[in-house]
Every structure is written in structure tokens, then in C-alpha cells.
Image: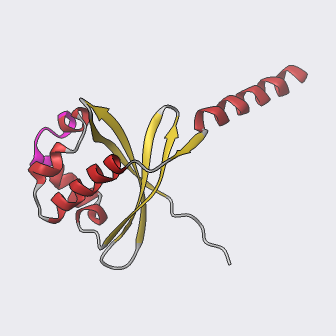
Amino acid sequence: MRTFFTGLTLAAAMTGALWAQEVLAPEPAIESTIQSQIDAFLKDDFVTAFTFASPNIRSMFGTPENFGRMVQQGYPMVWRPEDVTFGELREIAGGLYQMVIVKDAAGNLHYLDYRMQMIDGEWRIAGVQILQAPEVSA
């Protein structure tokens, strides 16, 4: 029984370490990359928007048009944001994640995590995840 609880405690500690995150100072170049891609979406310039994606993302979608369709259908708040605010830059399990808060045309807030990669000296977007909005309490 003691071994079971020791193993459970060790597993919990390791899981916590995997999800541990460190908040970093803002990185203007990361914010600029994300904002530049959003600006391109606002102009329906999928060719330019595609250049801010990592090579893995580009190979996954193949063409700027495929990428643009995916964003329009899966991330409409990014394609046509009303407002964009940058949250914390965090390091999680060795990766860099920039939180971005997007207000859509209806006034709804969407919390997104942009996974960033340095490729040939430039920040590129390696993925975007929609986060659950934080709970607000009075």
C-alpha cells in the first residue's frame, strides 16, 4: 500500500513538472509576428498570412488558400477580430506560448494560445489552441 501511494505521489509530482509554466517578459517580435498575420487575414491576404506559419503548418495545409479556408472556418475570430490584446508569454514544457485575447464582432472574448517557434532567426506560428475562458467571480 505504501508503494502505491509513493508511486502516486511521484506520478503527480512529475505531471505537475510537465505542466509547470514560467511567465516571461513580453517579446515584441512574437507579438509583431502574430499581429502581422492577423493584419494579413483582415485584408484576405492569405499568401502573406501563410508566411508567418511554421514550416510544419505550411506543409500540413500545402497552399495559402487551404490555410485561409481553415482559419475562416475554424478560427473566425482570428480572421475578423474586432480587437486583439496580448496576454502573458509563457514557457511550458520547453515551448513558448503567447496568450492572445481576441474580441469578435459580437463582442465575445476568445482566449488563444499561440505556440511560437524560432525558425531561421524569425518567430513563426507553430499552432493555435482555443483556451477555455477564465472564470470570473465577484
Residue at 29 percent of width and 59 percent of height:
75
Residue at 45 percent of width and 35 percent of height:
95
Up-down: is 96 above or below 37? above
x, y percent for residue 111: 44, 61
Quadrant in which the N terminus appears: top right
x, y percent for residue 42: 17, 65
Query: Which of these two is toward me, 28 or 119?
Result: 28
Could one spot residue 1 in this view of the protein? no
* 38 magenta-colored: no
Up-down: is 43 above or below 105? above
Q: Is residue 97 left or right of residue 54?
A: right
Could one spot residue 30 in this view of the protein? yes
Say how many tags the image has: 0
Please tell me whether the stretch drawn in magenta is mainly helix, strand or loop. helix
Query: Which of these two is toward me, 101 or 76?
Result: 101
The colour scheme used here is secondary structure
x, y percent for residue 105: 30, 77
Residue at 61 percent of width and 39 percent of height:
20
Quadrant in which the C terminus appears: bottom right
* 64 magenta-colored: yes
| Extreme-right residue of the structure | 2
Q: Is residue 83 left or right of residue 26?
A: left
Residue bounds of the magenta highlight: 59-66
Residue at 56 percent of width and 64 percent of height:
134
x, y percent for residue 112: 41, 56
Q: Is residue 70 left or right of residue 45?
A: right
- The quarter of the picture where residue 40 lies is bottom left
